[in-house]
Image (spheres, helix red, strand yellow):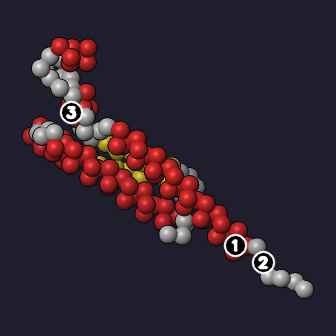
């Protein structure tokens, strides 16, 4: 990867899809059914700013998934979870935040490579003797 815009977009696309794959896998592991609607609801969008650079990565899924993650629903609120027979199924856990950190570091690396390439192209480093 050279760090150019296409590389950054490709990396973000791959990262966003990887997160969806991980979440679907975890939801399957926890046997979160919901008629399949939850599993089919995962999507992402890569949004660009006015300058054409990536501004934001947005993941979306049915709200039902958030309730399952916290163990609430079916007349059980968050305060009642510990007293009920419901258990949280944390399909969206710390893995996400570790992945965000890895994405941040990779984007910094790619922008650094791009900056270095621009400087290299625009500076005349020939020896004038």
Residue indicated by mark 1: 120
Is residue 24 something one can see in this rendering?
A: yes
> With 31 as the anchor, is 43 left or right in this view?
right
Chain-order first, disc 3 or disc 2: 3
Residue 8 pos. (x, y %): 49, 61
Q: Quadrant of residue 17?
A: bottom left
Chain-order first, disc 1 or disc 2: 1
Q: Residue at x 50, y 49 (%)?
A: 104
Above-or-below relation of 86 to 4: above
- Between the C-alphas of marks 3 and 2, the distance is 58 Å
Q: Quadrant of residue 58?
A: top left
Residue indicated by mark 3: 89
Q: Residue furthest bottom?
A: 129
Residue indicated by mark 2: 125
* Residues tagged 1 and 2 counted as in contact (Cβ below 8 A): yes
Residue 61 pos. (x, y %): 27, 41
Disc 2 secondary structure class: loop
Label 2: few (<14), some or many (≥20) within 10 Å?
A: few
Residue 108 pos. (x, y %): 56, 55
Residue 98 pos. (x, y %): 41, 44
- Between the C-alphas of marks 1 and 3, the distance is 50 Å
* Residues tagged 3 and 2 counted as in contact (Cβ below 8 A): no
Above-or-below relation of 113 to 58: below
Between residues 26 and 52, which one lies in front from this camera angle? 26
Q: Residue furthest left?
A: 35
């Amino acid at each position: 990867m050279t760090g150019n815009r296409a590389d950054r977009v490709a990396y973000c696309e791959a990262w966003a899809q990887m997160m969806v794959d991980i979440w679907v896998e975890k939801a399957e592991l926890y046997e979160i059914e919901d008629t399949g609607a939850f599993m089919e609801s995962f999507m992402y969008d890569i949004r660009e700013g006015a300058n054409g650079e990536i501004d934001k990565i947005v993941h979306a899924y049915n709200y039902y998934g958030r309730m399952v993650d916290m163990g609430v629903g079916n007349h059980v609120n968050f305060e009642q979870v510990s007293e009920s027979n419901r258990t949280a199924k944390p399909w969206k856990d710390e893995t996400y935040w570790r992945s965000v950190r890895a994405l941040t570091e990779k984007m910094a690396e790619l922008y650094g490579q791009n900056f270095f390439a621009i400087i290299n192209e625009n500076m005349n480093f020939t020896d004038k003797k």
